[in-house]
Amino acid sequence: MPENACLIIGCGKIAATHAQYLQQKVPLYFYSRDPQKAQLFNERYKGAGVLHTWEEVLARQEIKNWIICSPLKVHFAQLMDAIAQDKVILCEKPLCATREELSDIGNALQSSQAHLMVAENYCYRPLLAEIQQLLEENLIGDIQEVVVRKEFTQKSFDWRRDYGALLEGGIHFVAMLNSIVRSEVKELRAEIKGPASQERSSRVKIDYQNGVRAQILYSWETPSWTKGIFQHSRIKGSLGEIIFESNGLYLYLRAESRKLIFTKFSDFNGRSAMLDDFLQLTRNNDHRPRYSFKDVERDMGIIFNAYEQCTKE
């Protein structure tokens, strides 16, 4: 069994995206609750084999690398099995559904030789790299305020019906915001409609310890004739501002100099860079992924705090 062999767990749309990229790079095995789907993926992506039951998955301990693309409701159980077997794991976002699950995963990792990476592709997008470069060059001075916005209409289907939009989709923008601000949260205030499991619109205001004020506006129930495209977010600094298309198409620097930058369309969504980061982790377990478990704890903590705050109210 090659050391770089990967087991893809779940055979849906995102699993197909990963398999398409990885099929020429590593041997791939597939598992799905629907064996016919796993067999189809194995044929389509020139896989090395199909695992038919979860018992067989656990028995094949020689496959050291797992890519979990299953529905959120089974992430926790599958993750705990993977951690118990010291796997190298890439898990789709969101990692888990509750603060208690997040804590249990962290505790299990501490007593294990497993390595966990979460598939947060927004942290690998060319847009974020462009923003961070402009910030490092101090072209807008000290960051004062950040507003991140993505409001559109999206139907909640399959397992996603049971979880809030902020958790399932808004996590991308929480991760991106924290990658820009790079500070700990001082205070958080949230406006959310309905219970967490039915939340489809949210406004989260964050004061960071470095003085930055931020807002995230995220919705799956706001009419948008562009379907969320050409909505803009902004980073205001002491010397200027960066305005960027929220999906990552382009950004505009408005400061002493002005510049319109169209982001690279090669690997526009960051998934190839993310998968390459995971492959590096499979080769070298000392490698620190760009998006670590510490980052996951920080980002999911914001979402859980927002939900808990609204529950108390």
Image: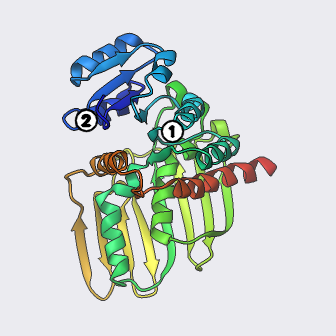
Label tally: 2
N-terminal of the two: label 1 or label 2? 2
Q: Which residue was labeled with disc 2?
A: 26
Question: Residue 258 appears at what percent x and percent y?
Answer: 26, 81
Amino acid type of the residue tagged 2 in the rendering: Val
Instruction: Look at the picture and state if 70 lies above or below 222.
Output: above
Q: Quadrant for residue 37, please give it.
A: top left
Residue 41 is at least partly visible in this image: no
Viewer-nearest of labels 1 and 2? 1
Q: Nearer the viewer, residue 114 or 294?
A: 114
Residue 34 is at least partly visible in this image: yes
Question: Residue 203 appears at what percent x and percent y?
Answer: 60, 56
Instruction: Look at the picture and state if 61 lies above or below 91.
Output: above
Q: Residue at x 59, y 30 (%)?
A: 77
Q: Nearer the viewer, residue 219 or 41?
A: 41
> Taking 297 as reference, is 26 left or right?
left
Q: Residues within 10 Å of mark 2 (few under 14, many from 20)?
A: some
Amino acid type of the residue tagged 1 in the rendering: Asp
Q: Residues within 10 Å of mark 1 (few under 14, many from 20)?
A: some
Question: Residue 137 appears at what percent x and percent y?
Answer: 33, 83
In the structure shown, which secondary structural element does the residue marked by tag 1 occupy?
Answer: loop
Question: Residue 282 appears at what percent x and percent y?
Answer: 36, 45
Task: Give the number of the disc on residue 86.
Answer: 1
